Amino acid sequence: MTNEELKNEIIRLKKEKNAVILGHYYQIDEIQALSDYVGDSLALAQEAQRTDAPIIVFCGVHFMAETAKILNPTRKVLLPDVEASCSLAESCTGEDLRRFKAEHPGHIVVSYVNCSAEVKAESDLICTSGNAEKLINALPADQKIIFAPDKNLGGYINRQTGREMVLWNGVCTVHDALEAESILKLKQQNPDAPVIAHPECNSAVLAVSEFIGSTKAMLNYVAKSEGKRFIVATESGILYEMRKNNPDKEFIAVPSGESCACTDCSYMKLNTLEKLYRCLRDEQPEIQLDAEMIERARRPIVRMLDMSRELGIIK
Ligand code: 13P
Ligand code: SF4
């Protein structure tokens, strides 16, 4: 089938099966265009909780589809490519976290949503890059905290809040590979363009950035800014929404090193039109989690959503 035929079939099947397609900003442009909702991980978790569609096709990575299943267990949740993982989720297993907890008695665990259901089940609170700083600030000042699995996001929150959370040693391989040196060169060539960065970037990159925020926060920043040019230090997929919403503005993507200009997340980009079509047609691969795991992993996610509403971060 041609791409056009695939798109038509996806639209037809979606309607026929009353399915909803949730797409992350890092998906390929064509998938974002076909999605009913496009968002960052926090917005997509909310949408997954809210939808009454019997089938949720989650175009993102595995931990995001798991989160959708945990929040809406009676729905069928599909993921076009079940191999779409995440380096952060892979860096820490449930067993790893249990051992780390035993080494740090008296600590609660706050986990970044980029982790498996098993790690969520071992956590007291989940956060996303869109709410992490406010949620951590809302915890008692003397509360001892383990933060897993992203040491870059955790380090950034420590610096922002003055906390000394114990950090699990995981990174997003896409954001961690971005280099401050290449950014400084781009800044010299484009002195009018502020650097906007995702907090998964390493501390050297964050130190030379003018704005740090989640995918959604970056989109809001460029939409509101009077500036016309921006240096963007994050995954390439965000450029689709940025350019669509701001046709009069220019976005300069940061290369991830001299030898590679690639900021594609290889996991996110595993989902293709062909796989999305087959997934809708065959209703698989399906996310399966047992009821006990759903119950245990659900608690810290619901706590995150409740706290986010109380703090006015989400509606
Ligand atoms: P957001 O929470 O900003 O959507 O980020 C998810 C992610 O995987 C970033 O690499
Ligand atoms: Fe995981 Fe990084 Fe890919 Fe996001 S960009 S899904 S954090 S590997």
Image (tube, rainbow, N blue to C red):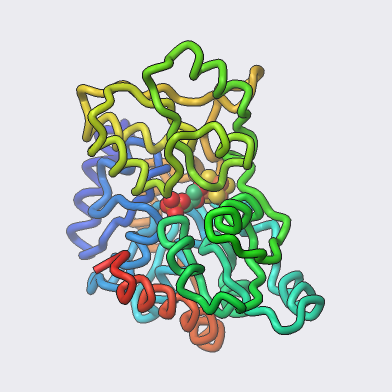
In this rendering, position of residue 46 left or right of residue 88 = left
| Spot occupied by residue 90 in the image (x, y as percentages of width and height) | 67, 57
Closest to the observer, 68 or 133: 133
| Spot occupied by residue 258 in the image (x, y as percentages of width and height) | 64, 18
Place residue 174 in its image quadrant: top right
Closest to the observer, 112 or 295: 112
Place residue 18 in its image quadrant: bottom left
In this rendering, position of residue 17 left or right of residue 71 = left
Please report the residue visible at 40 percent of the width from the left and 43 percent of the height from the top: 27
All told, the count of numbered labels is 0
The image shows residue 20, relative to residue 95, as above or below, that is: above
Please report the residue visible at 53 percent of the width from the left and 79 percent of the height from the top: 140
In this rendering, position of residue 37 left or right of residue 125 = left
Residue 80 visible in the picture = no
The image shows residue 64, relative to residue 140, as above or below, that is: above
| Spot occupied by residue 234 in the image (x, y as percentages of width and height) | 48, 37
| Spot occupied by residue 44 in the image (x, y as percentages of width and height) | 34, 60
Q: Which residue lies most toward the top here?
A: 189
The image shows residue 240, relative to residue 83, as above or below, that is: above
Please report the residue visible at 41 percent of the width from the left and 37 percent of the height from the top: 237
Closest to the observer, 182 or 256: 182
**In the rendered image, which quarter contains the N terminus?**
top left
Please report the residue visible at 27 percent of the width from the left and 22 percent of the height from the top: 228
**In the rendered image, which quarter contains the C terminus?**
bottom left
